Amino acid sequence: MEEHAPVRIIRMKPGDEAMVQRAEPLFDDPVNLASTRAFLADERHHLLIAYADQDEPAGFVSAVEIFHPDEPRPEMFLNELGVEPAFQRRGIATALIKELLQLCEFRGCSEMWLGTEETNTAALRTYEATGGNREDFILFTYKIQ
């Protein structure tokens, strides 16, 4: 089995816009500088980037704390998790989730939740392996024009 260097995970903060732009290949679409600034400026928005193999951006997780009037503690919504194909199957997604779970604990969250497709077997395995509990969940989306 091939050995890989340890993964380093950094939580992005205001002023790290260039680091986010450097990780642009990890995202579905081009990084928007104004959106990045707004995201990083909000303390309830979280972006963790994993670096591997000579400090290459290898994966990321983004999440948002959600508050509700009848809940004393926030919940964490894991919005997106992605690992560059060349870095997959090295435990990077697992490391990112574990780091996010630690952040949830530090931020006082009551739980973390997410949605994924039934056909995304890699994601299902990762979430189950990191202690996620599968729930019946139906997602509706609305396109806003």
Image (cartoon, rainbow, N blue to C red):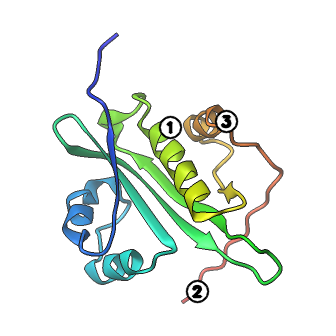
Q: Residue at x 59, y 42 (%)?
A: 120
Residue 130, placed above or below residue 66: above
Mark closer to the chain start, 3 or 2: 3
Q: Which residue is mark 2?
A: 144
**Mark 1 nearby-residue class (10 Å; few <14, some 14–19, many ≥20):** some
Judged from this view, the residue extending furthest toward the bottom is 145
Q: CA distance from mark 3 to mark 1?
A: 10 Å
Q: Which residue is mark 3?
A: 128
Mark 2: which amino acid? Ile
**Mark 2 nearby-residue class (10 Å; few <14, some 14–19, many ≥20):** few
Quadrant position of residue 83? top left
Secondary structure beneath label 1: helix
Q: Which mark is residue 94?
A: 1
Q: Which mark is residue 114?
A: none
Q: Residue at x 31, y 80 (%)?
A: 37
Point out the frontmost of discs 3 and 2. Answer: 3
Q: CA distance from mark 3 to mark 2?
A: 33 Å
Q: Do the residues bearing badges 3 and 2 touch, measured as CB atoms within 8 Å?
A: no
Quadrant position of residue 125? top right
**Residue 111: % across, % down:** 71, 57
Residue 42, placed above or below residue 1: below
Residue 5, placed above or below residue 75: above
Judging depth in this view, the residue of 32 and 70 nearest the camera is: 70
Mark 3: which amino acid? Glu
Q: Residue at x 40, y 77 (%)?
A: 39
